[in-house]
Amino acid sequence: MSQTHTQSEVFHLGLTKAMLKGATLAIVPGDPARSQRIAELMQNPQPLASHREFNSWLGELDGKPVVVCSTGIGGPSTSIAVEELAQLGVRTFLRVGTTGAIQPHINVGDVLITTGSVRLDGASYHFAPAAYPAVADFDCTTALVAGAKAKGTTAHVGITASSDTFYPGQERYDTFSGRVNKEWEGSMQQWQALHVMNYEMESATLLTMCAALGLRAGMIAGVIVNRTQQEIPNAETMKKTESDSVAIAIEAARHLI
Ligand SMILES: O=P(O)(O)O[C@H]1O[C@H](CO)[C@@H](O)[C@H]1O
Ligand SMILES: O=c1cc[nH]c(=O)[nH]1
């Protein structure tokens, strides 16, 4: 039996269609605290709901509503946020994240725009088989690139490795066990050789599911660590990096709504 969810709250986000005021674009950070900071850079920021990792705000750009909703970390919760926002009428998703660069020429503080992701997740396989690409929407990507140019920010455009895990899947050895399974040994070197720019944890699911469902998705992230230099990010660099990537995403959203 098919169900409609338009009059009542969607199960996880606690949002209704009326609360979104017709918003068709969502900015989706991972970090719940980032939702408020993003919304407050728009007009009329209003908190909507906060359940689990899903912190939602509404703002306006040029008089049009834009919803901001955190996804939490990783593919499963991202897939829930996207599914439930789509049930409420959202058709375009811009992820604003943080990331670890794996190419030596990319600096901490730079911004990365993802054209496609290596699917090192699990959730994307629930939407499309392995041969299907995790590819960003062309209009979203060009809007992000134009936004970066308008802000004068150094943006690298290319492929991201999107992993279910922060530690083994991103080949980190500075851990409790100090080891990774054979599957991941040498994997960072392999992605480097294949010109992958960076690691993060949601874009494989976001880009695959949106492409498969006929939704638009784009992805921008600020570099908080360069893995050719260190394994764990430095908290001090995070603030400026976030403000650049958020400003670009808002500029892109303005063009996409
Ligand atoms: O800053 P966010 O958007 O959460 O993105 C990155 O940061 C988290 C890991 O620290 C993962 O979610 C990863 O994708
Ligand atoms: O190295 C990093 C930094 C942020 N987020 C990730 O997933 N990896």
Image (spheres, rainbow, N blue to C red):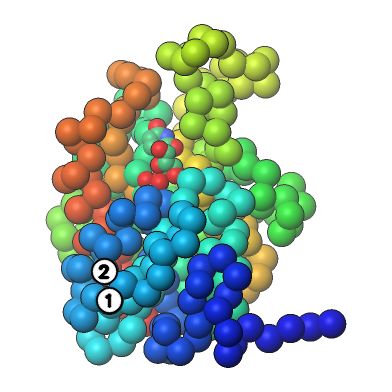
Q: Callout 1: 10 Å neighbours few (<14), some, many (20+)?
A: some
Query: Could you tell me residue 147's position as x and y percent?
Result: 25, 64
Between discs 2 and 1, the one toward the N terminus:
2
Please tell me the numbered disc located at residue 39.
2
Res. 8 image quadrant: bottom right
The answer to whether 155 is drawn above or below residue 178 in the figure is: below
Query: Could you tell me residue 202's position as x and y percent?
Result: 51, 49
Amino acid, disc 1: Gln
The residue drawn where x is 30% and y is 39% is 223
Q: Which residue is farthest right?
A: 1
Amino acid, disc 2: Ala
* Circle 1 SS class: strand
In front here: 239 or 32? 32
Residue placed under numbered mark 1 in the picture: 46
* Circle 2 SS class: helix
Alpha carbon separation for disc pair 2 and 1: 8 Å
Q: Are marks 2 and 1 in contact (CB under 8 Å)?
A: yes
The answer to whether 157 is drawn above or below residue 213 in the figure is: above
Res. 59 image quadrant: bottom left
In front here: 156 or 68? 68
The residue drawn where x is 66% and y is 52% is 124
Q: Quick one: quadrant of the N terminus?
A: bottom right
